[in-house]
Amino acid sequence: MTAEDEARAYYAPEIARGVDRFFEPRRTECVWCGSSDLAVRAVTPDIVQHKPGVFTLDGCRACGHVFQNPRLTGEGLGFYYRDTYDGLGEASTEFGFGLVARDYRRRARTLRAHGAQPKRWLDVGAGFGHFCKEAKGVWPDTEFAGLDQGAGIVKGLDRGWVAQAHRGSFVDLAPELAGSYDVVSMHHYLEHTTEPFAEIEAAARVLDPGGFLQIEVPDPESAFARLFGNHWFQWMQPQHLHMFPHANLAKAVTDAGFEVVEVVRSKADLGHDFVFASLVVLNAFGPKPSRPWAKPTLVGRLRHYAALLTAVPTVAVAFVLDHTVRHLIPGHTNAYRLIARRV
């Protein structure tokens, strides 16, 4: 039996039972501030793998926090993450990680402006360890460790990309790692977590006074979140559970015992909003018909071929827009990086 056949054998009965069971009850109050003044920011399908299901992001009018509502249960997260970073999706995901080495080095250089001389650096949500591999070139005397719930971090250890590999929940592992590191980084990790306050508190526990916490997350206040609406790639449903306006995150970090020393915007920008929005639309219209959680149909194949035919000119135009008018739009940055020192 091939990996695809095994996947079909798993997904067929799961989908037959329906996906509504994967969601918690809808919340009527903001998970960040408790306000009941909520409004829908986006309603999207699974834009990562195109598994069945519809996901709603609510925004709080009082504090600006954006969160998945209703939120996926633990079982639901397991279903939708399956075959993304492992299994059928592992090779393509790792290929994508390898394309952004410049971004990893740019993140690693950020602490130079703050006089940091890190000896031991823990990257949380490290995946396979691609960031640690590139950051080692920026900080050759630093020992890099990676923490992730997936098996990829063990592969990173085998490849020599990390000196230590911690597999599991950061919140659960924090007590045994207390005081072990002088830098903790979370790059596009915190928005995936169910309890971001607990993650920040775990970082405070792991760091000694004077240590640095570096967090990079998508910016829900970006102009492109409004411009592209449901098609903004950074919503990245169903994986992104929380989206933090920078003022909210700064306050949460401060309350956990940190002093915010810098918020980086332009150098944290991931770019490519027009290209990714065009791909979101094309993939939603004609996703790959052979994916093992869907039954191939003639209509599905025709839609996929139509999407492929229009992809080149559509993406080409989007690419030009990304490299010409995008930077003229006020508030165009789609992510920010927050640096804080443990006090």
Image (spheres, rainbow, N blue to C red):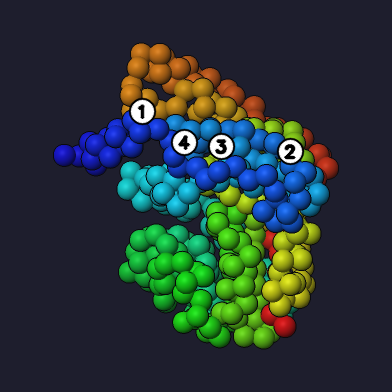
Nearer to the camera, 123 or 77: 77
How crowded is the residue under tag 4: few (<14 C-alpha within 10 Å), some, or many (20+)?
few
- Residue 320 drawn at (x, y percent): 67, 32
Real-space Cα distance between discs 1 and 2? 32 Å
Look at mark 3 in the image and give the residue it sits on: 55
* Nearest-to-viewer mark from 3 and 4: 4
Look at mark 2 in the image and give the residue it sits on: 39
Is 272 above or below relative to 104? above
Residue type at the position of mark 2: Ala
Residue type at the position of mark 1: Ala
| Mark 1 secondary-structure assignment | loop
Residue 43 is left or right of residue 33, and the answer is left
* x 61%, y 61%: residue: 196
Residue 315: tell me if it is visible.
Answer: no
Look at mark 4 in the image and give the residue it sits on: 20
- Residue 22 lies in quadrant: top left
Real-space Cα distance between discs 4 and 2? 21 Å
Real-space Cα distance between discs 4 and 1? 17 Å
Look at mark 1 in the image and give the residue it sits on: 294
| Mark 4 secondary-structure assignment | helix
Residue 268 is left or right of residue 141, and the answer is right
- State if disc 2 and disc 1 touch (CB < 8 Å): no
- Residue 318 drawn at (x, y percent): 64, 30
Q: How many marks?
A: 4
Residue type at the position of mark 4: Asp
- Residue 301 drawn at (x, y percent): 38, 18
On-image quarter of the N terminus: top left
* x 70%, y 36%: residue: 40
| Mark 2 secondary-structure assignment | strand
Residue 1: tell me if it is visible.
Answer: yes
Sequence-wise, the earlier of marks 2 and 3 is 2
Real-space Cα distance between discs 2 and 3? 14 Å
